Image: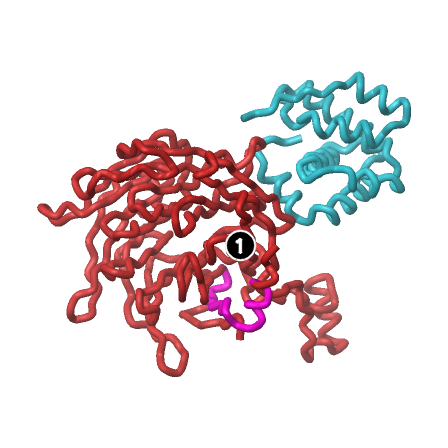
Amino acid sequence: MAASIQKVGPAIPIQCHAWSSDRQTIAVSHNDKLVELYKQQPGGSWNQTDILDQHDLRVNDIDWAPNTNRIVTCSADRNAYVWVQGADGKWKHTLVLLRINRAATCVRWSPQENKFAVGSGARIISICYLDEEKDWWVAKHIRKPLRSTITTVDWHPNNILLAAGCTDFKVRVFSTYIKEIEPKPSATEWGAKMPFANLMAEFSNSPTGGGWIHAVAFNEEGTRLAWVGHDSSIAVADAPSGMVMMKLKTNLLPFLSLLWIGPNRLLAAGHDCVPVLFHVDSAGKVSQGPKLEEGGNVVEATAAASAKNMFKNKDRLGQELVDSRLGTTHQNQINSMRILEGNKVEARRVSTTAGDGALVIWNLASGALAGKLAALKI
Amino acid sequence: GDDAAIIDANQINSLLSSNKNVEALKLFLSSSPTGVKDPTSKKAARDLAFRILMAIKTAQMDGAISQLDQDSLDVLMKFIYAGFESPYEGSSGHLLVWHEKVFSATGIGSVVRVLADKRKA
């Protein structure tokens, strides 16, 4: 089956999710201060194995480093914790002092997993690295020229450059070079000089404003940067061609998350509750492809179609038949999407979590979806 | 950056009086009319938009819409909602027809952009 729905805990909205490197365990947060780990059982169900309970307020983002097996969580309580699994299987936490006075909104490990970036409502991005001598995480701040909440961050493969989307309707690329822990980086298409916090590129989502940026994503080589904004648009900036930005305004509701699933293919998902395919051609132009499944409201044709129930619904809801159930697998907006199997060059399976509390796994290589992907060649 | 409005009211009025209503609409929409800042000019822009939209008959709407690009349609949707917000006498029915036709061309995306864009009609 192309889309398979998984039950990880109660049907409460899931804020964020992250996979262990063997993909057997998933970390989720159900819009509260806890991070729950669920492990897949042989029968296909999910058992809760751990609860990471240190945050005081809602956990906004989780990231799980595949090689070092460390989990980082950040929360509205202005803190981040790094979690390490001991030999006994228990997760031990270390507090990271972000030195911010507003909520932390998003967090991502760098490709080499020696740094992580935390966006926040304090108009600051905290770049955290481990001070080996003192064995604690140090945070350095990127402030200029951020003027509003950072909503999303993504790392360039060179472990130095970081893209950040903001509620000031702009997307920026910064250098996070920390001389204490890494060698000087060589030049990329985004520029040559990379002192810490240097602004390498800035893109305005639209001359007319453009809406908050909800997700940013570098492609595999780091030559292109894609993002989605609240004005129902998707855009791609191409560094080698001189930072040219191509934007597509869609006819759909805004997207909240974005993934590269191929060198020229993007998958975006959000308020329409279903992932949508996009194609980027060699010039950087974005065109819309099919949705991964068809939606539309479904009328509940159950025994409820008796005369008594029809009048009851008419009285209670104003219409005879209840049609509030969506035809898509997810019943609420998708806010988090991860590659489950594969990578940015060839993603085979993708996972989504949404406001309906469901985890859905999409098999892009399955017959039905593979057909849509193939049809996407324009 | 910010496009300042460059509405040529005289040209638009002369197009309207010679019954070239669709031309007037195209000219209006391409002059960045949402870039107007001060309240008096904003009211003037809305008044002009209202006159153009009322001048175009229902039968001409589909033809007009097919000649507009995506950005112009987004601007048009903003002025349709501006007309709902501060209605002129007898305009709502006509505006609802406009809304239905623009919506079928742009989908819900343009309505989202009415709400999400910094620059309003």
Q: Which segment is the magenta one?
A: A355-373
Query: In the current view of this chain or complex, which residue is farthest to the top?
Result: B10
Q: Can residue A168 be seen in this view?
A: no
| A290 w.r.t. A49: above or below | above
Q: Does the magenta stretch include residue A272?
A: no
Q: Residue at 83% x, 20% y: name it.
A: B13
**Is B50 on the left-hand or right-hand side of A101?**
right
- Give x and y (percent) for residue A43: 39, 83
**Is B102 on the left-hand or right-hand side of A206?**
right
Frontmost residue, A173 versus A80: A173
For mark 1, name the chain. A
* Chain that the image shows in red: A
Q: Does the magenta stretch include residue A358?
A: yes
Q: Chain B hue?
A: cyan
Tag 1 residue: A270
**Is A319 on the left-hand or right-hand side of B112?**
right
